Image (spheres, rainbow, N blue to C red):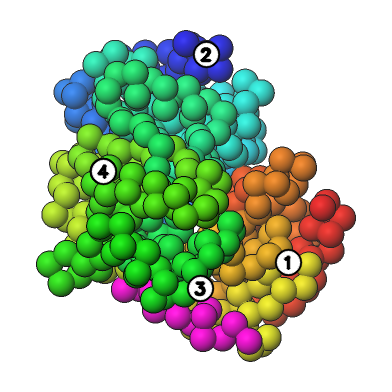
Amino acid sequence: MENGLQDIKEESQAAVEKIKEYDGKIRLVGQYDADGISATAIAYQMLERAGKEFEYEILKQLYEEDVERLAEEDEELILFVDIGSGKASSIEEILAPEKEVIVVDHHEPSEKGSFVHLNPHFLGIDGGEAISAAGMSFIVAWAYDEENIDLVELALIGATGDIQKQEGEFLGLNSDLEKLAVENEIVKKRKGLDLYGRTTKPLKDSLKYTTDPHLEGISNDDNGAVQFVQSHGVNIRENGSFRTLSDLSEEEERKLINGLIKTGRPVQPLLNNIYTLENGYEVDEFSTVINACGRLGKARTGVNILVERDLELAKKISRAYSRKIAKSLRFVENNKNDEEYIYEDGIGVIDAEDNIKDDFIGTVTTISMSNGFFTSDVVVGAAYSGKDEIKISSRASKDAVEAGLNLGEIIGEICEELDGEGGGHNVAAGAKIPRENKDEFLEMLREKIGQET
């Protein structure tokens, strides 16, 4: 085992022993995104398999009033996953004197505290890209019982949702978890076409929207994309519906790859690792489903899907989410020439106001960056949230992050100056700010990005 994983596993023993020794009811608290839901599902199954009595809840954010409320709850042991490190000071002051507390997180901690606090940053490991909260929760579950090794696939789902997999490669310690999953035949790994919308868009659109590299006669050509697929013996439809790339068999996908090679089109840049879970879903697609649960206000449904392996429920969520995202993306596409809403000036901006719901602006920002809609190294989306606030979601390119850019730090600094709340990781960060400070926020972000890149 790599030193980083071993270090975390050793550090997790304090949490393991506290859970094993505790005989009362436990309160499990997780966060509502794909990583938090995956981390919650891992902890859920660890506790259930251990025969522990527990209840769980999912929060969007942990506020001081939540900490105060938890101090009054009946459970004497509170287990936080993917949430808590940022409020460690409040936990130390309000909750720790009243309860046993375990925090398993990967966000930047405000302090360590006297409670059991497992966080990669305390070991000199970057929680922004090296390991997700689901990865941290998995290591705790694995340390608790080696039989929990099957939960490693949930760690990869969480890491993918937290943008800790880029261009087919898991980053940092996630790559060690990936090896563990593949070696134990929990996840299958192969090379495949890593096109935009591989699991969510019609195959013809995935090919048509591939512009880097340019595919002569296919890129930006709907008829050309359809003709290419059909000329290589692959059906574009099945049961009346357009097929996605992930719907194809490996043999059909090889036909397309060979077709690209034989016609002299560049294929090597499009080949990346494809990971298939035990349930048959590709990790990217299933991570999107779990993320969708949180965005649709159905985080507990996401936990149920992971715990019960309920694929029918996953399909229902996927359909509902696809409709919501499609509507949001149409706003971006329809307003691409309207600089009131969409523009580039050092950074790419989607100023959605109330045209995109705040729960979806992060996903729209991610897709708009990944599909080449913007050329900037940083893309930021803004949507109305609540009565007087704006939710900010920002994404950075891999090249910018490798050059030293840290969006989380920049967003955090700006929020301190503008009476906002925010932060995150180097590649992805978010914030909530007063609406009146939107223009100033974007200007400060543009200036700071310009200084860093």
Label located before the other in sequence (1 or 3): 3
Q: Position of residue 113 (x, y in %)?
A: 59, 28
Q: Is residue 277 left or right of residue 389?
A: left
Q: Which residue bears the numbered disc 2?
A: 2
Between the residue at mark 1 and the residue at mark 3, the CA separation in whole angstroms equals 25 Å
Between the residue at mark 3 and the residue at mark 2, the CA separation in whole angstroms equals 45 Å
Q: Position of residue 117 (x, y in %)?
A: 52, 26
Give the residue at x 34% y 24%.
182
Q: Which residue bears the numbered disc 3?
A: 220
Asked if labels 2 and 4 touch by Cβ distance under 8 angstroms, the answer is: no
Mark in front: 4 vs 1: 4
Q: How many marks?
A: 4
**Closer to us: 275 or 348:** 275
Asked if labels 3 and 1 touch by Cβ distance under 8 angstroms, the answer is: no
Kind of residue indicated by mark 2: Glu
Label located before the other in sequence (2 or 1): 2
Kind of residue indicated by mark 3: Asn
